[in-house]
Amino acid sequence: MPQPGVQAQTPALFEIENAIVADYARRTPGGHLSSMRLHITLMFVFLCTGGCPHVLAAPKNMILIIGDGLDDQHVTMGRNYLAGMSGELRMDQLPFRASVQVETLSPQGEPRYVADSANTATALATGAVTSIGRIATDIEDNDLPTIAEAALSAGLRVGLVTTSSLTDATPAAFLSHVSARSCEGPEEILGSTYYGIALPACPTDALENSGPGSIVEQLVTSGAQVLLGGGEKFLRQQTVDGNTVAELALSEGFLIIDRDTQLEALSAPQRLLGAFDDETLEVRWRGTKARVAESPQVSWLHHISDYLGEVTEPEPMNCELNPDYADTPSLAAMSRAALHQLAFDNPRGFFLMIESASIDKQSHERNPCGSIGEIEQLEETLALAMNFADSHPDTAIIVTADHAQAAQILPEPSLYARYPIPLYSPGRTARVRTPEGGMLRINYATNNGFSEEHTGANVPLFSNRVIAPWLKPFLRQREVYQAMSRFLFGPPPAPNKDGAEN
């Protein structure tokens, strides 16, 4: 027998499903609508088992803050430097914490134990496990409906804010579908190179082949209210129609803003598109005179024997302001503008994804000060979100990471410093002076090339109490998506035997 409330909500669910399918059809010429309709139907059946009294009901706001590469090593680096060894970050003050297992597949469907930002953002955005490099597509190249698309179709506003290019893997996975993350613009979708190496193309996704277009083309036609970050060079590219992507965005109703725009002076509500750098935004901090981690220097005798000679460690460094940061909008400033646009005169609620991208990017470059400065930006943005939630009690906040990164905190000095032989850590090391007078020794040693690699640890999750009933202490990354979807669209959590929600 149907449960009370389910039958009454059927028209609402049917309305949402049809809206998503229609929106998908508009943005995907030649798409497989029957497959997409099945995906969406199953999603709502899953979310609404037991009734959907909250669908199209009171407004709810979901703020997802992703620290790219923000594993526990980076959280601890940030805490030690920004708050002191015995201090607390703002994320530490959130009442719920969990560990999140990252899942990845090979193109053949076998398990892989280290991920990239594309497949992990896809898991957070869609609840599906896929292979490295894919943007909201599965290993068979089927498009996966995202939580941001479901929010738009349910009448919620959607915003993406990032310190990377808007076309980078994390923001892209919430509002676009391509087979490879390299297909950022109309010029890249048919093939591009990186340091002379050919990158994957996405010919079936190209507009000229009746596909949905490159990432940037899909973003500006997605229906999002706010898109703020980097990637200005992609707006200058020409579409198959001969217009620039910027002109396409204007035709979609966006106000295009730049570094000269006073974000706090913008009226609301209006659709905002801001790309404040060609690609990734400049980071706030750097090491002394732009120093990064360095290799230890060994004497010639050490090349004869591991037990002979001497080793000289890199000199200590300080974190200093990066002069190239200059007039770069902060993550908090962009997020404040986004919250204003999304919340103003909005009875339906919103979904906002905020990414602090260069925790990861600076770890690739072995620059701990760059990563720590980006953690500071995340902290400022979290403070803003927490203040917003104080005055908007149906606002859920999740802070998490997509994957782990290369940085490791090592002993300073080494536990074996008194041994009469030259001992040192492999890879490259930075010795960073902290404001409280300590020495933070950070090591990078995943390879001997020009860029460090991701690592395979689980990542942390922090949340406020609003969404905690949908979470548990150990989660798989796809279950974070499920929790956010249930919060926005599904029934309230069932009370446990003690009367508390679980």
Image (cartoon, grey):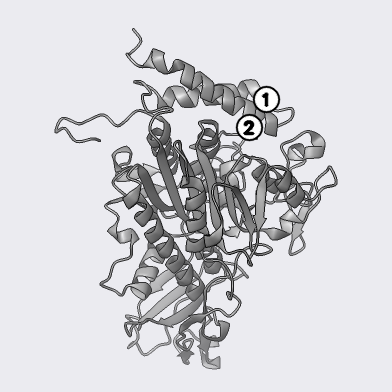
Q: Is residue 41 above or below residue 179?
A: above
| Residue 81 falls in image quadrant | bottom left
Other residues around mark 2 within 10 Å, as few (<14) / some (14–19) / many (≥20): some
Q: Is residue 305 above or below residue 267?
A: below
Amino acid under disc 1: His
- Picture disc at residue 306: none
Mark 1 or mark 2, which is nearer the start of the sequence? Answer: 1
In the displayed structure, does residue 368 sit left or right of residue 448?
A: left
Q: Is residue 36 above or below residue 1?
A: below
| Residue 411 falls in image quadrant | bottom left
| Residue identified by numbered label 1 | 32
In the displayed structure, does residue 95 sit left or right of residue 129?
A: left
Q: Position of residue 497 (x, y in %)?
A: 15, 30
State how far apart marks 2 and 1 are (Cα): 9 Å
Residue nearest the viewer, comparing 163 with 130: 163
Q: Position of residue 211 (x, y in %)?
A: 74, 35
| Residue identified by numbered label 2 | 142
In the displayed structure, does residue 306 sit left or right of residue 245?
A: left
Residue nearest the viewer, comparing 501 with 406: 501
Q: Position of residue 52 (x, y in %)?
A: 38, 23
Residue nearest the viewer, comparing 461 with 356: 356
Other residues around mark 1 within 10 Å, as few (<14) / some (14–19) / many (≥20): few
- Disc 2, SS: loop
Residue at the extreme left of the image, as rendered: 498
